[in-house]
Amino acid sequence: MTWTKQRLNNLFFLIGIAACVIMLFTFDVSFVELWQHLCTAGYWLIPIIGVWVLIYGINAASWWRVIKGVDPEAKVSPWVVYKLTISGYALNYATPVGGLGGEPYRIMELSKYVDKRKATSSVILYAMMHIFAHFWFWFSSIFLYLALAVVGDLPLNVPISCVLGFIALLFFGAFYVFSKGYKNGVVMKVLGWIGMIPGLKGWSKRFAERHNDALQNVDKQIAALFSQDKKAFYSSLLLEYLSRWAQSLEVLFMLLLFGVDNGGGIDGIMLTYLHSVLIVGLTTFFANLIGFLPMQIGVQEGGFVLSIAALGLSAALGIFVSIICRVREIVWIFIGIMLMKVKE
């Protein structure tokens, strides 16, 4: 079993390295232009890349709460959880269909420390928490936009109001689906949805019958965390939600780099930060709509350009932000892949 896991670890490692190389040679700009953008960023690259030490730390703390909620006796160190958090996200960024590489890798590695079923439950629960926090972040961004519109900072007209209202209704539907999943489990439901895809009905049925007991157990553990350990559930959700606000610091640094500070001072920088929150909210919303592309190629760039332009800033700034974010992603993908070879 250990030898099989080592071979799988090597496979994930090689996939990550290959993805990094492909991404480096498929940039939408030439290496000359890329170098110019990096020179423009200069020393600001340090906080832009470095803030993700904090963001991944918050993510790891959220997953740690889930692991302890599922298995209070779990003997896994915070460092291991932190390392697996970074490596898991690196694989998610690098492979098509987000989660295709990161989640199986996390389950495989975490099962060295806890029962495999509990490892599976905690990884699925954390993935659900990650997505659920995204929805709360997007939902709260609507009210942030309305608040800034009320004070006259952003425009608000009938078309914008209709779009915000429609998005809010979509989120209410998502909240309902998540609440049902947390109360009753979600694995068997997902298999049922997969069975509706042409050509996969037979496979999903056979898989469910072959692993029925294990899948039912995972669903029970998912439901148990929500019903029995609400403190772990809500603290994990809060941490994931806060990580989105921490992520907005990255955009803030880039806006400040270009002198976009709304007059300067504490008030100006705070307003710029709130604009950064809206930019991250809109961009991640677009990027997650098409999550089957590696690093959401093209979608993230378009999201940055559209969201920044919507706030009255230049499209060129949006392109710069998207390119620097790509560089940051490649740096952290490389770090995450290298961490796969670091012993606990």
Image (cartoon, rainbow, N blue to C red):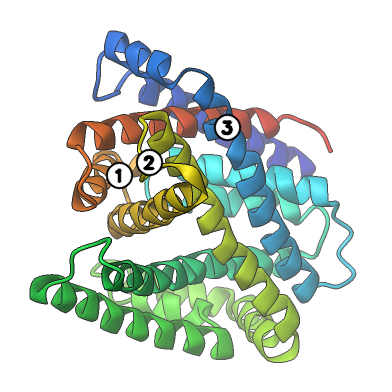
Q: Secondary structure at mark 2?
A: helix
Q: CA distance from mark 1 to mark 2?
A: 8 Å
* Residue for point 23% across, 74% down: 164
In contact (CB < 8 Å): disc 3 and disc 2 = no
Q: Is residue 124 visible?
A: yes
Mark 2 — residue?
295
Q: Which mark is residue 30?
A: none
Give the x, y percent position of residue 200: 32, 68
Q: Residues within 10 Å of mark 3 (few under 14, many from 20)?
A: some
Left or right of residue 53: residue 151: left
Mark 3 or mark 1, which has the lower sequence index? 3
Residue 344's x, y, as percent?
84, 38
Residue 19, position in %: x, y? Answer: 43, 29
Residue 175 to residue 52: above or below? below
Whether 223 is drawn above or below 331: the answer is below
Front-lying residue, 243 or 144 = 144
Please, what is the three-letter code of the amino acid marked with disc 3?
A: Pro
- Residue shown at 66%/55% (left/top)? 58
Q: Which residue is mark 3?
A: 47
Quarter of the image for residue 69 reads bottom right
- Seen at 29% across and 23% down, the residue is 26
Between 175 and 105, the one lying in front of the other is 175
Contact check, label 1 and label 2, Cβ < 8 Å: yes
- Which amino acid, by three-letter code, is at mark 1? Gln
Q: Which residue is mark 1?
A: 300
Q: Which type of secondary structure does the marked residue at label 1 adopt?
A: helix
**Few, some or many residues within 10 Å of mark 2 (<14, 14–19, 20+):** many
